[in-house]
Image (spheres, rainbow, N blue to C red):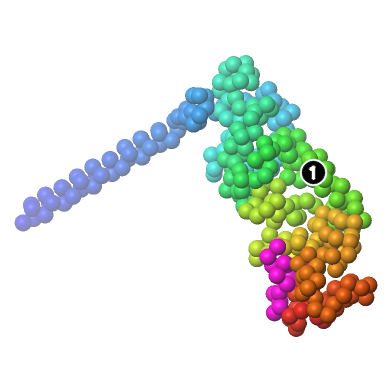
Amino acid sequence: MQDFRTLKQFEVGLVMVALLLLLSLTAIAESKQETQTPPPAPAAGSGGAQYVGEQVCQSCHEEIAKKFDASPHWMTTQKTKMTNGAHACESCHGPGSAHVEGGGDKTKIFNFVGAKPEAITERCMTCHGSSLEQQHFEQSVHNENGITCTNCHSIHHSQLEYLLVKKQTALCFSCHAEQRSDFQKPFRHRVEAGLIQCSDCHNAHGTTGMRQVRATPEQDFVCFKCHSDKRGPFVFEHEPVKVDGCGACHSPHGSTNPRMLNTARTNSLCLQCHAATDAIGHTQNTRLQQCIACHSNIHGSNLSNVFFK
């Protein structure tokens, strides 16, 4: 009986030694695998080129690299490289080995200068396509008209907010001349004075609404962000405010009429919907031409269904 117990103890000990030996060999193999860095795999669509790293790019593009290192893109394409696999310059331009081997041949790397707008947009949307601000760009009016990211943004050289090529107001006005003239009218939003910017009301990257107009978080018209007293909700709603929006009565950029109205006289504006036959007992004499003299709560009322005070 004693011999049997001794034999069993010897077998158990032998198994333990074998397990320890196996674990040691496995650890050594894994350690060797970690110390050997495999060559980078070619990127998809790169024609077999491989990533060469930021230092190689800097050896020729030193000035651009200095500006890039101070830009927001450096934070996401190089500083966080260990967590998201980014590749600094090559995150946007693609793997650079063929470009380097070709002595700086520009045809062997993606060059944004001269590239087709849709190709540039595709590159930028690789990262920005999931952003709430840019997610609708491919359906935007700008994209449909061949305006791409680099028309408004300068990745390497800009020192302005959002990497714009010039200050926002001047940038928008370089294309939107009609709107610029509206802001010169007597009654206007004070964009030229710098108190409001185009992007406060419009999302240049596109929205699901008309004219790339923003909405409030509650999905109301963006006008209510500033003109909150007109928002409601009201017991008695004025239908054009909720259905057609502020633009049914007001010119949002600027007007020659007080209150930025679409017509010079208030009654002319009201009668576009409320024909004279509806105004029983009313005449269009001077005393009754200002509808809002009586219907003062024209945006909505909690007390009167005809918007009296």
Residue 133 position (above or below residue 68)? below
Q: Nearer the viewer, residue 204 or 153?
A: 204
Q: Position of residue 241 (x, y in %)?
A: 73, 67
The residue under the point 65% across, 63% down is 219
Farthest left residue in view: 1
The residue under the point 56% across, 20% down is 98
Farthest right residue in view: 286
Q: Quadrant of the C terminus?
A: bottom right
Residue 1 position (above or below residue 143)? below
Q: Position of residue 198 (x, y in %)?
A: 78, 51
Q: Position of residue 7 (x, y in %)?
A: 11, 49
Q: Which residues are magenta?
A: 227-244
Farthest bottom residue in view: 303
The residue under the point 61% across, 20% down is 107
Quadrant assignment, res 117: top right
Q: Nearer the viewer, residue 27 or 167?
A: 167
Q: Position of residue 16 (x, y in %)?
A: 23, 47
Q: Nearer the viewer, residue 278 or 33?
A: 278
Quadrant assignment, res 225: bottom right
Residue beneath label 1, please? 176
- Please say whether residue 73 is one of the residues in the magenta stretch: no
Quadrant assignment, res 266: bottom right
The residue under the point 90% across, 50% down is 184
Secondary structure of the residue carrying numbered label 1? loop
Q: Is residue 286 left or right of residue 276?
A: right
Residue 171 in view, yes or no: no
Which amino acid, mark 1?
A: His
Residue 59 position (above or below residue 253)? above
How many badges with numbers are in the image? Answer: 1
